Image (spheres, rainbow, N blue to C red):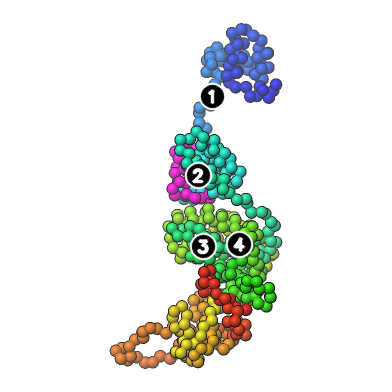
Amino acid sequence: MREVLLTMTELQKYQIIKKLTDEDGNKKTAAIKIGCTLRHINRMIAGYRSGGKAFFVHGNHAHKPTTMIAEETRKLLLDLYATKYAGSNFAHYTELLAERENICVSKSYVRRVFREDDILSPKAHKTTRKNLAKKLREQQKAATTKKELAAVCSAILDLEDAHPRRPRCLHFGELAQMDASEFLWFGDIKTHLHLAVDDSTGILVGGYFDMQETLDGYYNVLYQILCEYGIPYGFLTDKRTVFEYKKKNETAVEKDTFTQFGYACKRLGIEIKTTSVPQAKGRVERMNATLQSRLPVELKLEGITTIAAANEFLNSYIKKFNQRFALPINHSSSVFEKQPSAEEINLILSVLAPRKVDGGSCIKYHNKYYLPIDARGLAVHYRKGTAAIAIKAFDGELYCSINDISYALEEVKIHQEASPAFAPIVLKKEPRKRYVPPKDHPWRSSFLKHMHSQAHRNESEIPTDFICT
């Protein structure tokens, strides 16, 4: 009985008091039906006699609360999301509104307003999408334009299950998951964002844009990790040939080959594990999805249209992103090893390519001719056909290794820079001394001697990669 009384409407109260007044009924019975005291029954009778039916209308009826957001602000939120901040998830959208538009609203309010207009967040759960699809199917039966509603329903229903959960690694630096995501990050051309995410803390430890998923992109990510944190214990990646290469139907371990990236990791003592299952590296896969819903909006607001500008912006954005989402670092449990020197990093993150010395004592590399130069700045000559290894360091400097001896490479110009016959007389300068890697560098080791026999190139994925045993 009590539960029924609590749900009684104003109209029911009016009918009880009207009948009580007109028929001179029992006040105690009316008080029991309404669930109030006799004193309040007398107050409602007096109110009915003076104000009639209007007395039973609540004083705040049709009055907007003082805390209610104005209708103009609601329309502005919809307009900004449809134009300036299109594609951002609702949590990110509220942050952008407070930061750039000085509009402070809650995520729940934005979610409620957008749901009324059948707008879903890119990060909406599968249940939410199914509920909206059900609603649209009901509206589709009575709609005049079924084509648009059918397209929305098919898009919402075409979803995948979330990645399965697994425990995080215990130590910071114990495992970094790496991957590249192809997406319309900026402009009209798809680019690839190379990422590395620490499995223990979720910290984005490195990121780099490139036109394709390349060795250079992963080298830049590894360079950021080495400079900022140190040497990690291991990487978890997919089975691309930039990380590992095995000949088809080859089972002998000694026949396995190292890629450029694999050899660099071997020199640094980093273990590489690969998997063909995306769910196995769910940390970086979810990071890709998160950045795809946030980063393009940020790049668009900054007016970025080039890879160089995007990579420059990414350096500051990663720090801001980690402060917002990553777990705090426990430095006492970090397993990152001490950073190598800048010189060591530059030489380790190099690209090797087999070459032959031609009849002019030069080495051809990327359609240009280079002459080997020793540490004194003097040219060195070898017989035609002598095997050599062209080496491009991370900073772009070119070297070569011939007979276990390292040299710098100097480009041979197509034309002389000055004419000896028509230029003013100048004193001949001493040869400029050139930097040559030290004797204990791995380029000089026997490791490079027989690499040609196990060489493998994959032009479609790694244009400059060279795989060696």
Q: The disc labelled 2 sits on which kind of residue?
A: Ala
Q: Is residue 372 magenta?
A: no
The residue positioned 56% from the left and 54% from the top of the image is 290
The residue positioned 49% from the left and 48% from the top of the image is 97
Coordinates of residue 241 in the picture (x, y in percent): 58, 69
Residue 466 or residue 227, whichever sits in front: 466
Could you tell me which secondary element the residue under label 3 belongs to? strand
Coordinates of residue 145 in the picture (x, y in percent): 46, 38
Give whichever of discs 1 and 4 has the lower sequence position.
1
Residue hosting label 1: 59
- The answer to whether one can see residue 340 in this image is no
Residue mark closest to the camera, 2 vs 1: 2
Instruction: Estimate the spatial distance between the alpha carbons at disc 2 and disc 1, rounded to whole Å.
Output: 46 Å
Residue hosting label 3: 192
Residue 166 or residue 19, whichever sits in front: 166
Q: The disc labelled 4 sits on which kind of residue?
A: Val
Q: The disc labelled 1 sits on which kind of residue?
A: Gly
Residue hosting label 4: 197
Could you tell me which secondary element the residue under label 4 belongs to? strand
* Crowding at mark 4 (Cα within 10 Å: few <14, some 14-19, many 20+): many
Quadrant of the frame with the N terminus? top right
Give whichever of discs 3 and 1 has the lower sequence position.
1
Q: What's drawn in magenta, residue-wise?
A: 66-92
The dot on residue 426 is none
Q: The disc labelled 3 sits on which kind of residue?
A: His
**Number of marks present in the image shown:** 4
> Badges 1 and 4: C-beta atoms under 8 Å apart?
no
Residue hosting label 2: 151
The residue positioned 53% from the left and 85% from the top of the image is 388
Position above or below: 192 against 444: above
Instruction: Estimate the spatial distance between the alpha carbons at disc 3 and disc 2, rounded to whole Å.
Output: 29 Å
